[in-house]
Amino acid sequence: MLNPDLRPILKNRLSRYSLVTATAKRAREISDKMEEKKIVLTEKPVSMALEELLDGIYEIVEPEEIRNI
């Protein structure tokens, strides 16, 4: 997943900052979990995290005051 279409995830007026932050946090969770289980990943954790967000497995919830920044 080199250049995914982000419109579906940003259509609800979600800020790009929230998207980047949520993706980074989820990627860290994936990386830590796999390291803990001693599993070597063939796909990058950031790609996996973004794919999960785009597939709707995880939902980003941001405060209303951030949306208009």
Image (cartoon, grey):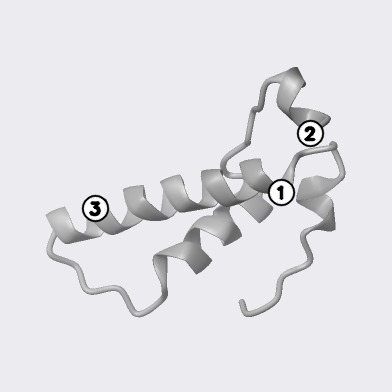
| Contact check, label 1 and label 3, Cβ < 8 Å | no
The residue shown at (78%, 30%) is 67
Amino acid at the residue labelled 2: Ile
Quadrant in the picture for residue 3: bottom right
Front label number (1 vs 3): 1
- Residue 1 on image: x %, y %: 61, 76
Q: Which mark is residue 32?
A: 3
Horizontal side of 26 relative to 42 (left or right) equals right
- Give residue 59's quadrant in the image: top right
Q: Which of the pair 24/44 is nearer the observer?
A: 24
Dot 3 alpha-carbon crowd within 10 angstroms: few under 14, some 14 to 19, many 20 or more: few
- The type of residue carrying mark 3 is Asp
Residue sitting at 57 percent across and 58 percent down?
Answer: 50
Q: Which circle, 2 or 1, is nearer the viewer? A: 2
* Badge 1 or badge 3: first in the primary sequence: 1
Q: Residues within 10 Å of mark 1 (few under 14, many from 20)?
A: few
Q: Where is residue 41 in the image (x, y as percent from the top left)?
A: 30, 73
Residue at image position (22%, 74%) is: 40
Q: What element carries label 3?
A: helix
**Depicted 42 relative to depicted 62: above or below:** below
Report which residue position mark 2 lands on. Answer: 69
SS state under label 2: loop
Q: Residue at x 79, y 34 (%)?
A: 69
CB within 8 Å, label 2 to label 1: no
Circle 2 Cα neighbour tier, 10 Å, few/some/many (<14 / 14–19 / ≥20): few
Spatial CA distance of label 1 from label 3 is 24 Å
Locate residue 64, reporting x and y percent.
76, 19
Point out the tag, 3 or 2, that comes first from the N-terminus: 3
Comparing marks 3 and 2, which lies closer to the viewer? 2
Residue located beneath label 1 in the image: 16
